[in-house]
Amino acid sequence: MSGGVFGYAALSTRARAMYSDLFSPQDVARLGDAPDFPSLVGALKGTPYGKYISGLKDGEMTPRRVIHQIRTRLADSYSSVIQQAPGDTRPLVRQLFRYFEVGNLKAVLRSISTVSSWNSDLPAWERVREVLFPFGAFESIPAQAMVEAGNVPAAVELLRGTPYETAISFAMKRYSAEQNLFPLEVALDLDYWRNLWGEVKNLQNKKDRDMAGKLIGSLLDLNNLMWVIRYKTYHNLSEEELINYTLPFGYRVKDEDIRSIAAGADIAAVISRVHPDIPDVNALLERPQSGLPKLELLLKQRVMRQCVSAFIGDPFHIGLPLAYLLLSDFEIQDLVVLIEAKYSKLADAEYRPLLLKTTLIQ
Amino acid sequence: MLFGDAMLFPKQMSEVELIVPSKDLVAVAKALSGYGVFHQVDSANLGLDSLGPNTWQEKAGIYASLERRVQSILQTVGLTEEYPDKRDIDSVADLGAAQAEVDRIEGAVRGVSDKLSAEKKRLELLESQLRQIEPIADVNIEVGALGKSAYMYSILGVVPAANISRLRTSLLRVPHVFFILREDAQKPVVWILGPRSNSDVLERAAKSAYLNPLSLPEEFGGTPEQITATLEREIEASKKKIVNLETDLARLGGSHKGQLQKLLWDVHISRVMADAIVRFGQLRHTYVVVGWVPTADLEGLTARLKEASREILIETTDTGRSGHHAHVPVALAQNKWLKPFQSLVGTYGHPSYGELDPTLLVAFTFPLLYGAMFGDLGQGLLMMTLGLLAHNKIFLKGLQSLGLLFAYCGASAAVFGYLYGSIFGFEGHLVEEYLHFHFEPTWISPMEDILNVLSIAIDVGIVILIFSFLLSMFNNIRSRDWAHLLFGHTGVAAFLFYLCFLALVFGGFFGSTALAPKIAVALYNLPIPFTPLLAVFGFFVMFGGFFRNMVEGHTLIEGRGIGGFGMFLVQSVMDLVETGISMLSNTLSFIRVGAFAVAHGGLSLAIFALAGEEPTPGFWVTIVLGNLFIIGFEGLIVYIQTMRLHYYEILGKFFHGGGLQFEPLKLTPSEEEA
């Protein structure tokens, strides 16, 4: 038996312990009170992130390096969950973790296509490595060799034997014709989420399948909705393109919702039907530049609530560790906002509305 | 003396400083590069402003480029890089002549090689077209005609299997026909057909579903079957053409072989010399060259340098082995029989100049500890044979570098097997019962005398640890590091503390147990007041840092401001506790030698339990497979344990490493570098 009380006793206890280490909204607000970037880093040193940033010397305290180090904590959490999770759930956690590798892959490809415009003495790889997620031993892409390959086709050649080979090889024809990374990135995203959903469906235990479906499905809802709205609003894509660039599954958002948006239905009406608790959707969509990030934030907070609810009731399922990992990621997103804001000396009013945790309690 | 100084210490080095007249620059560079004994120091490290002249930097770049071009030509014509047996170093190659020669041969070779690569590309294209048409080979329609229809629009292509359902959904709003021509888990072939008026919708849907249209050759008309036949004929012709071009290239290689090998040698040595000259320091009319030479080779090099330049000024300084010499490169004596142990030591660290090279000690202790843990006459001899076969590249060629180590460890295991009375896992009455000869332990049977074996293992550990302490003190004396000699973690105070600790803990406290090591018991029985001595030496160990600072004239208490005197006392007490715990664990660590000797017998018994009692063919198959398993599995574990004992318990006591590797200028790469 892979799941149940025996399979999850240790992992659930650990996930709960790690969950209690996450910041409360008040903690995040207090960090936001730091007057500047060095004070924020000083405050972070007294938190569970302290051990990850204490190794940085004063001269190395750039926002990129601090963020890189902070993300190492999330990588460690993933690694720890993967090791302790019951055998049949590990592929799901591994695939969820791969989200950051897909991000790294996109960053590598973007760096290659923009490297010629960089005016720096630093080798390209030195510039890129700091923005990559510290994937560690789970890394399957030869990031450095790709950056050093110097062009996208040669870099993509190096992906042979990796989980991304098939998806990206199909998209390469379009890249060659269009010289644009958009088809490559969309192909990677679709492939990633399809595989993740496939892993959810592969879970043997019904409780695991339900909980993972709820959490991963909510994430998928968020992505699917934001994709279709952005492609329609910013890229003006046709109905058939919108359908092909989205996915037909999720938790609350159904294929019909996506298809109706693609066919020209009122987006606000669809969103209000799926998430009746989101207020003033029309107002948000009227000014997409500021409204869409706000909408995304509200949708992320709905996922956060799903995650928090996973800690209530029966703890012996994969939902607990998954929820912790997602919440930990959201927390780091808040920290990234804080770090960038403090470094750029932004006024409170400019960045506080972007914080997921503090706005959640307002 | 059984082993000369050269085996125990890195080679004695001499520092050489040369003042070279400009006119003899090349000749001196040749003398320095040609014999593999001169380790050059970059003149940039000497503080000389003017480094090698720019012209030489340019030349070095051009020679390097020529060398790469010649290597590329050799590769194109299928020749291997060879250096002449008689390594003449006539002169730096004339750049103009060498360049012209390379241009000429490269031109001839490129003419053919370009045609060859173009033909190979064509073949690739034809083969890919054939693969593309394969899925529709039995569709009896004229493919070319599909695109010419006035009312119908057709798309034929490969699509990611995962996208098919979404592609179908995206086409729902227009009339269409959707065929899957080839079912494939990854890359199915699909055919979409719809009214030409909806071609834009069909195109957008196909494109956004990542459908890659099949690019069928326009020049080949007809049905897929007819196109396939034409493509197959073309492929055959292309292959023949490639064979002919390859023959032409090989012929070119044959006719230019001599010239290419000579060119490679000329540009190679010119590049090495130019690289060396670039690092010379330049004065007004002379050059300064500084480097290191093994003292034994100094005389020969001096003679050759004087031959190369009559006006050269040579100043040499012998470097004694004592004291600190972090900047002196370290050349170790090469002995092919000790090579595996040199690698083991090298993995831990490269000896620094003047430091004892532990290779010889490891060559003795490694097989000894390995054999003691893996004692079996038959398995040892088998391992030795396999090691020798691997070393001589007859069998298990991939393990050639480890062959000798296997052989030594196998021989030692065989000796211990003889002492333990164990042969292929058969021990005691089992030997007579199944092998029909008499064989009994000539020393001890680990399985029957377990506690005694464990006690002996601790004794062996004590001897090795005492020897390691002594070696550490010897190294400190040689480097004149009096502070560490007296108060270091492996210095005199720590050593005497260890002896008292041994006597009281292992000889006194555990003295009455069966595990008590005999050395410790004997020590305890000496009429020496160990308890007060332990307190005295403990005091020196506890405040070792304080006393070391006193001897070296540093601030007596480091980090005085942090935590004050109280914190210093706490740290000192913790130092003493840590020393005591590590001495206990270091000593007990060797118990594993005895434990593995016992475990070896236990594992053999498990194999016998699986095999049964009757000597049937099944019994012997199990015994053979079990022995192979033991050699592979336990052999590896014992290897890791032996390495661990060496790295943590032995080398860590006296060997620091961190030496600068001797990297002489040389014209041809060594076998290892190649």
Image (cartoon, rainbow, N blue to C red):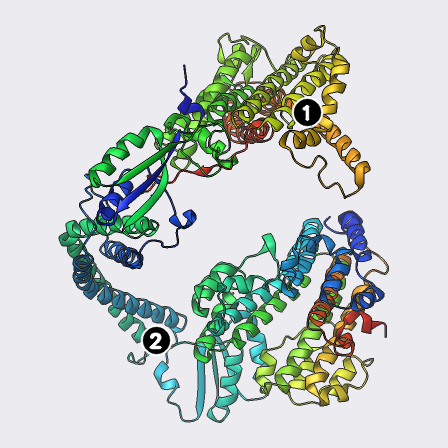
Residue B224: mark: 2
Q: Give the quadrant of the N terminus of chain B.
A: top left
Q: Nearer the viewer, mark 1 or mark 2?
A: 1
Q: Is B607 rendered above or below residue B22?
A: above
The answer to whether residue B98 is seen in the rendering is yes
SS category of the residue bearing label 2: helix
Front residue of B175/A100: it is A100
Kindly identify the residue that appears in the image at 30 percent across and 50 percent down.
B277
The residue at which mark 1 appears reads as B583
**Which residue ends up furthest to the left in the rendered image?**
B255
Q: CA distance from mark 1 to mark 2?
A: 82 Å
Left or right: B269 in relation to A309: left
Residue A303, image x and y in percent?
Answer: 76, 70
Q: Amino acid at mark 1?
A: Met
Q: Amino acid at mark 2?
A: Pro
Q: Is B566 rendered above or below residue A228?
A: above
Left or right: A57 in relation to B572: left
Left or right: A301 in relation to B469: right
Kindly identify the residue that appears in the image at 58 percent across and 10 percent down.
B444
Kindly identify the residue that appears in the image at 19 percent across and 58 percent down.
B249
